[in-house]
Image (cartoon, grey):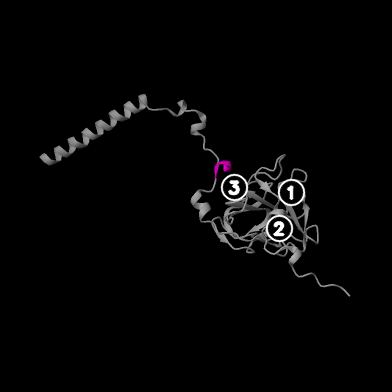
Amino acid sequence: MKKAVRTMSLILTFALAAAVIWVIWQRIGPRLEDLPASAVTPKPLDPAFVRLKPRETATLPLATRFDMPLGSEHGALTYNARGFRIERHLGDDLNGIGGENSDLGDPVYAAGAGRVIYAGVPSADWGKMILIAHRLPEGDELGPVVQTMYAHLESIQVRTGKNVRRGEVIGTVGTAPSANFAHLHFEVRVGPQVNPGQGYADTALNRVSPEKFIEARRGAQAAVLNPAPQKD
Ligand SMILES: [Zn+2]
């Protein structure tokens, strides 16, 4: 009996203490309406502030060679419909030589060994997009990390976080939401910022010419390759 009374008084004491704390908190605690609107509105992720951490950069696959992401390793059977820095364009628009939508659904290859750091649909204009981060060999003027970007895809065949080999199929060519025919918008970006970004700007931002970048890093130069067979 005594034990029950003691337990009851203990519970009552706790309840009373909780009630007192609750009343005080109601008087002096912050009220929702007192907080600035920015503190209670959920913020969308601002990709401009996402960047690879040094540890992530250090563990990226080393890319010792790069190839074109469409057609053959040297980009045969493709053409560049709109090059880097033409009409404020920040990448290359790669097409199959058949023109129009002949390249729709063609495989898109990882330009070099790397890790997928983004695979999704950042906006209706971009459609499906993949970003791959590559670690460059020591001494490369653009190192330690560059990214290759592939946009307007019809399909994405890799997940964020996956390590890819050079030449691995990562998706397929799709159409841009604007009335353009199917093509691959391809960019090379310098640095660890992870941001879907924009395709046009007055300055180059952190982009470099994809064609020149690959030309300088694809192993044997075109001049030392076996010549094409000659016609009689
Ligand atoms: Zn483009």
Q: Nearer the viewer, mark 2 or mark 3?
A: 2
**Quarter of image, res 153:** bottom right
Quadrant showing the N terminus: top left
- Overall secondary structure of the magenta stretch? helix
Q: Residue furthest front?
A: 139
Q: Residue furthest bottom?
A: 232
| Magenta extent | 46-50
Q: Amino acid at mark 1?
A: Phe
Neighbour tally class for label 1: few under 14, some 14-19, many 20 plus, Cα within 10 Å: many
Label 3 CB-ligand 1 distance < 8 A: no
* In magenta stretch: residue 48: yes
7 vs 222, left or right, is left
> Which residue was labeled with disc 3?
191
Separation of residues labelled 1 and 3 (CA atoms): 18 Å
Residue 109 drawn at (x, y percent): 66, 61
> Which residue was labeled with disc 1?
84
Separation of residues labelled 2 and 3 (CA atoms): 20 Å
